[in-house]
Image (spheres, rainbow, N blue to C red):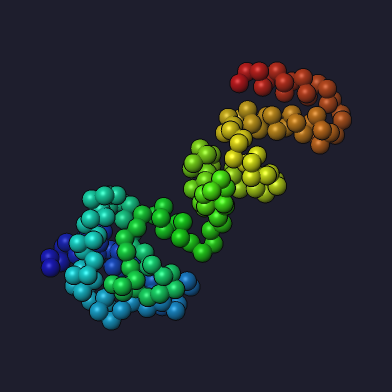
Amino acid sequence: MNKIYKSRSKFYKLWVGVNRRVGKQKNYRNIIISDEWREFQAFFDDMFNSYCEHVNKYGEKHTTIERIDRNGNYCKENCVWATQKVQANNRSSNVYIFYNGETKSISDWARKLGISRQALAQRIEKGWSLDKIFSTPKKNGRRFLLQDILDGVMRGKFGTKNRSELISRLTDILTLF
């Protein structure tokens, strides 16, 4: 195999990354790489064709190596190619929500709703019901913030000094949106 290809290719860099991670990084201390895969040629023989298929479908930028069993080792039987999005959904720290017959991660639900992951997490933290979470439309950021402040002022959250003037000004500003 051409040395220049090996050192510059994303495929080679993925193999190098696996070798750097195993046994060294905190989350990989109990993970090993198979004896065969310690040699690049064996890794190439096992994984290059499926790598090319994944790259053709998703692009090189979106192709990463993933272990099927996250507690298993790096070997032909336990590795596949996946996008970053798929890998992110397979993290053990993910929170899943079951709603309307579907189970999705918070990130996937946020994408489906057209809101940020943070916005969905805030709805959950505020104790919203699932029906309210999924039926409330996306808000314009500034308008939503101003409306939130106005609601707080009207509930007395910010005290009473100049309250009526503040309500009047916020209401005027909201009409501009």
Which quadrant of the view contains residue 13? Answer: bottom left
- Residue 147: x and y in percent read 69, 29
Return the residue nearer the eye: 127 or 27. 127
- Residue 125: x and y in percent read 67, 49
Q: What residue appears at the point 52 percent right and 39 percent down from the top-left corner?
A: 113
- Residue 53: x and y in percent read 23, 55
Whether residue 167 sits left or right of residue 177 in the image: it is right
Q: What residue appears at the point 21 percent right and 57 percent down from the top-left corner?
A: 52
Kindly give the residue lying farthest to the left in the view shown: 2
Q: Is residue 79 visible?
A: yes
Which quadrant of the view contains residue 128? Answer: top right
Picture layout, residue 114 above or below residue 87? above
Picture layout, residue 151 above or below residue 76? above
Q: Work out which quarter of the rendered image holds the C terminus and state it.
A: top right
- Residue 71: x and y in percent read 44, 73
Whether residue 15 sits left or right of residue 169 in the image: it is left
Q: What residue appears at the point 41 percent right and 70 percent down from the top-left corner?
A: 69
Q: What residue appears at the point 33 percent right and 52 percent down from the top-left corner?
A: 62
Q: Work out which quarter of the rendered image holds the N terminus and state it.
A: bottom left
Return the residue nearer the eye: 36 or 113. 113
